[in-house]
Image (tube, rainbow, N blue to C red):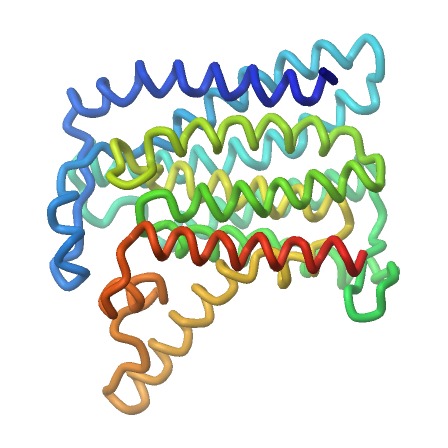
Amino acid sequence: MDFHTKLLLITFAITVFLGIIIVPILKKLKVGQIERTDGPETHLKKQGTPTMGGIIMMLGIIAVTVVAYFYYNGKEPDVAHKLLPILGLTIGFGVIGFIDDFKKLILKNTKGLKPSLKMLGLLLISVIFVLYIEKGLNLGTETYIPILNQFVTIPIYAYIPFAILVILATTNAVNLTDGIDGLSPSVCTIIITCLTVIATMFEVKEIVIFGAIVIGATLAFLMFNMHPAKVFMGDTGSLFLGGVISGIALYLKMPLILLIIAIIPVIETISVIIQVAFFKKTGKRVFKMAPIHHHFELSGWKENKVVVVFSLITLVASIIALQII
């Protein structure tokens, strides 16, 4: 068994253990989900289900990544040091999500963190991350173009805002995908697995390591999040996973591949944009409810069916992406 597989299994075990401890604590603190009254009726029974569960994944990933850092620091210090920026990006996003969840669920401030402050925080972390990987790690601005099937060097003045946009857009898309038991972690696990396979193909060792760790954590979280969910990830988890996916894609110099493998988060985002724009113009709705996973729910699909179909679409998209690289 190679070391990466061991990291995945260790992270899985640690995250499951953390879940067993943390979920009852969240229940005791009454950190319960607040369901929309205009949403699917089946969701009303979820009222009060513990949320902020993303902290379970975060703690598991942080713990094992720190261990991996010290393990590789003596053997391959360059690999070890490259683990820290992406860990910092994801922790930063997770902390912002945690603050938002904390204000809404613990302090009972229904508005949570002001959208402007949340966006400012995400923007600042994104800017710091992109500047560091370019100026500190010198990763370069080569970017893979799927249609051309080749890497193209983008001018630095264009690449920096482009990379920041990728991080923010990906994080928002993953956040929108979180709305059904098991949907976001299932889809994200497949996306991260695909990116990790790509990292293996191109021998980007730090991403193989980090990807294996994250996969272990997301699979473990699914143990608690599959329907009927015992805990929800909240913004803590969705922002965290958005940072993971975008950060890995930028490390691999393949942010545009997300248009293929992250097709579900892309569709979820487009559905919201269409719904809002069409309603503002006509006063009518294109979908029964947006994001689109709720449309299928209101059309009679069970939650598990939505999760399975969306996960299979992500899997097929990932296979296609691997074939064209």
Q: Residue 60 appears at what percent x and percent y?
A: 49, 20
Q: Residue 151 appears at what percent x and percent y?
A: 87, 59
Q: Is residue 229 above or below residue 79?
A: below
Quadrant housing the N terminus:
top right
Q: Is residue 249 above or below residue 203?
A: below
Residue at x 19%, y 31% (from the top left corner): 31
Residue at x 85%, y 48% (from the top left corner): 140
Quadrant housing the C terminus:
bottom right
Residue at x 25%, y 70% (from the top left corner): 299
Q: Residue 321 appears at what percent x and percent y?
A: 71, 57
Q: Nearer the viewer, residue 180 or 69?
A: 180
Residue at x 37%, y 29% (from the top left corner): 223
Q: Is residue 131 above or below residue 156?
A: above
Q: Nearer the viewer, residue 269 or 305?
A: 305
Q: Residue 198 appears at what percent x and percent y?
A: 75, 44
Q: Is residue 168 left or right of residue 234?
A: right
Q: Is residue 134 above or below residue 5?
A: below
Q: Is residue 132 left or right of residue 273?
A: right
The quarter of the displayed image where residue 177 is located = bottom left
- Figure label count: 0
The quarter of the displayed image where residue 259 is located = bottom right
Q: Residue furthest bottom?
A: 282
